Amino acid sequence: MDSTTPVRIIGAGLAGCEAAWQCARRGVQVELFEMRPVRSTPAHHTADFAELVCSNSLKSSSENTAPWLLKEEMRRADSLLLEIARLTAVPAGHALAVDRALFAAQITDAVSNHPNITVRREEATAIDANALTIIATGPLTSEALSQEIARLVAPPLSVAPPLSSPSLAGQGGGVPSSHLYFYDSISPIVEADSIDRSRVYMAARYDKGSADYINCPMTREEYDRFYDALLSAQPVEEKDWEKLNYFESCLPIEEIARRGRDTLRFGPMKPVGLIDPRSGQRPYAVVQLRQENLRADSYNIVGFQNHLRFPEQARVFRLIPGMENARFLRYGQIHRNTYINAPTLLGPTLQMKTHPRIMFAGQISGVEGYVESIATGLLAGMNAVMLARGNDPLPPPRETAFGSLVNYITASESKNFQPANITFDLLLPLENRIRDRAERHKAQCDRALKALDAWLAEYEPQLERKSATSERIPAQRLGEKF
Ligand SMILES: Cc1cc2nc3c(=O)[nH]c(=O)nc-3n(C[C@H](O)[C@H](O)[C@H](O)COP(=O)(O)OP(=O)(O)OC[C@H]3O[C@@H](n4cnc5c(N)ncnc54)[C@H](O)[C@@H]3O)c2cc1C
């Protein structure tokens, strides 16, 4: 056994599980804290690790897209969660989507049965700044720990206060300068056999990938009727703390609709590239449904996150052609999103500048999205291995998607900092600009992967990846579940 300092990881979500695995597989002891099921969050429904709380998609698998690049870098760095995602994938055209129950079960199994990981099913409420710790408690970090983090990062740099905090009352859409948070939303899921197949068609946009999406086409009259019903639908009772900013790339559907009668037709209901094979025509608007699980017995309504009362959701969404008798397995919701002001607090190895034994990973570190959360968990895990052995971690190269994400959260303007997904905007521009977009992206991806390979070649020996304690994922055991 490795005689290194144990690593404390708080939160067995996407980032925490990946971080734990990266440490444990290299012989570093991990103490992993997860508060569920003792205490749950408003969005999680199970006691499983790495539960996906909304969409089941890990974004595009199309080569030379930014989400693909990030996943490719994770694959090359031996990400456990990415491998399990591939093993539990469901058909989703050019996206990597998973059966969420299998995905979480496989991860729970692999992580909790690892001999180097001790799982503590309890809420962590205190942080010892001298203990090597990765905080990966996600956007729904418990109130007690939020307060502890606020203490650790000290004003004016802190996280969201508890929802009950009177300091937010009456803010009226403003974000207090010493606290950062906003609200995200989740989209509804319906039972597959409650969809009227005679009214819908299967297709992928521009026929890209296989035709895995159910498309509900709308005429102009149907769209107008739906739009009017949506605008007049009753929202969930608004509290003062809900008058805060929504995250722009995850707006509730009714909020998008309020921006103009046609805004939805240029957003989540856009019909371009979705010709109805029965008529040969492009519908006026389209609602897309994406398969939720391998059994294909449930579908989520893509982009329909909302903040409406549940009966109102049922009433309005049943106006969508094909969904007249839809049975809802889950309704849309709004939730809290807590994250730190990373540009002020973190260095390029995800260590706190003021408390270098503490690292942040996942959504709380200022990235947005499942894959980005896993990626920062992977990096924090690798870095924790180095720190546990008394060595300095090595930040990823700026050219890579890893390096670009880290650069975004640590080197952005700290004022008005908002979490971000990986995009080409975050990647380092090419020295000689290529006009053709596809060629430019390919060149950026090629450069990133070359830099990544060189970095891994330098870093891996230092991480003792090839030591006797190093492990790969037990594929056979994972495969047995299917
Ligand atoms: C409702 C909702 C919907 C979202 N939808 C999407 C989406 O569709 N697509 C997308 O890409 N991203 C989405 N996100 C954003 C983000 O990608 C996910 O939240 C993702 O799960 C973040 O990963 P994480 O590891 O940072 O946190 P999580 O996966 O949330 O893991 C954090 C873990 O920490 C535990 N925890 C919290 N506090 C404590 C404590 N004090 N002690 C011990 N354990 C604790 C929690 O129980 C949880 O298991 C959504 C976020 C939310 C909240």
Image (cartoon, rainbow, N blue to C red):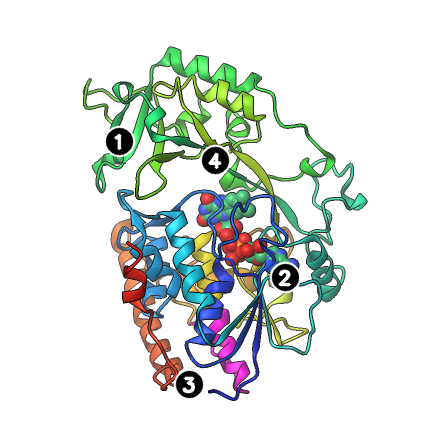
Looking at marks 4 and 2 on the same chain, the residue that comes earlier in the sequence is marked by 2
Element on which disc 3 rests: helix
Looking at marks 4 and 3 on the same chain, the residue that comes earlier in the sequence is marked by 4
Q: Are marks 1 and 2 in contact (CB under 8 Å)?
A: no
Q: Nearer the viewer, mark 1 or mark 4?
A: 4
The residue pinned by badge 2 equals: 122
Q: CA distance from mark 1 to mark 4?
A: 23 Å
**In the image, the residue with mark 4 has its CB under 8 Å from the nearest atom of ligand 1:** yes
| Magenta segment boundaries in residue numbering | 380-396
Decide: few, some or many residues near mark 2? Use Cα within 10 Å; few <14, some 14-19, many ≥20. some
Magenta-colored stretch includes residue 252: no
User: What label does residue 187 carry, if any?
Assistant: 4
Decide: few, some or many residues near mark 1? Use Cα within 10 Å; few <14, some 14-19, many ≥20. few
Q: Residue at coordinates 66% horizontally, 39% vertically from top-left?
A: 244
**In the image, the residue with mark 3 has its CB under 8 Å from the nearest atom of ligand 1:** no
Q: Are marks 4 and 2 in contact (CB under 8 Å)?
A: no
The residue pinned by badge 1 equals: 273
* Disc 1 residue type (three-letter): Gly
Q: Nearer the viewer, mark 1 or mark 2?
A: 2
* Disc 3 residue type (three-letter): Gln
